[in-house]
Image (cartoon, rainbow, N blue to C red):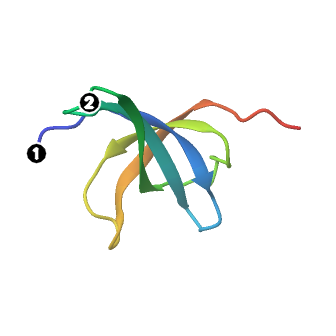
Amino acid sequence: MATKAPVTGVVVSDKMDKTVKVAIERQVRDPLYGKSQRRTSTFLAHDEKNEAKVGDRVAIAESRPLSRRKRWVVTSVVEKAKEI
């Protein structure tokens, strides 16, 4: 199995143990009208050390199935969230 390129997204939930929910945003053009739309996909990713928090930008990579919905692994925290 070829390794996929890592994707970056924003952590939207870290309530689970060793798991984070990552939202990945992309732009898609409407085929008929040509208007650009933002589409969001959410993935569950394995975070072994529980280091990613809500608002952090993380890099994730595809892996073997770890549970029913979890097929991604957090490779690194790219940018920490700004604290208020």
Q: Position of residue 37 (x, y in %)?
A: 39, 34
On screen, residue 30 above or below 43: above
Q: Residues within 10 Å of mark 1 (few under 14, many from 20)?
A: few
State the image coordinates of residue 41 (x, y, percent, origin top left): 40, 49
Circle 2 sits in a helix, a strand or a loop, which is it?
A: loop
Residue 26 placement: quadrant: top left
Q: Quadrant of residue 68?
A: bottom left
Callout 1 amino acid: Met
Q: Which numbered circle lies on residue 33?
A: 2
- The part of the image, by quadrant, that contains residue 8 is top left
- Which residue, as the protein is rendered here, is positioned at the far front? 33
Image quarter in which the N terminus is found = top left
Tell which circle, 1 or 2, labels the residue nearer the N-terminal end. 1
Q: At 69% across and 33% down in the image, what residue appears?
A: 80
Which of the pair 17/7 is nearer the observer? 7
Residue carrying label 1: 1
The residue located at (20%, 33%) in the rendering is 32
Note whether residue 66 is visible: yes
Q: Amino acid at mark 2?
A: Tyr
Q: Which of these two is toward me, 1 or 57?
A: 57
- How many numbered discs? 2
What separation in Å lies between label 1 and label 2 (alpha carbons)?
37 Å
Residue at 28% across, 31% down: 5
Query: Could you tell me if residue 47 is visible in this image?
Result: no
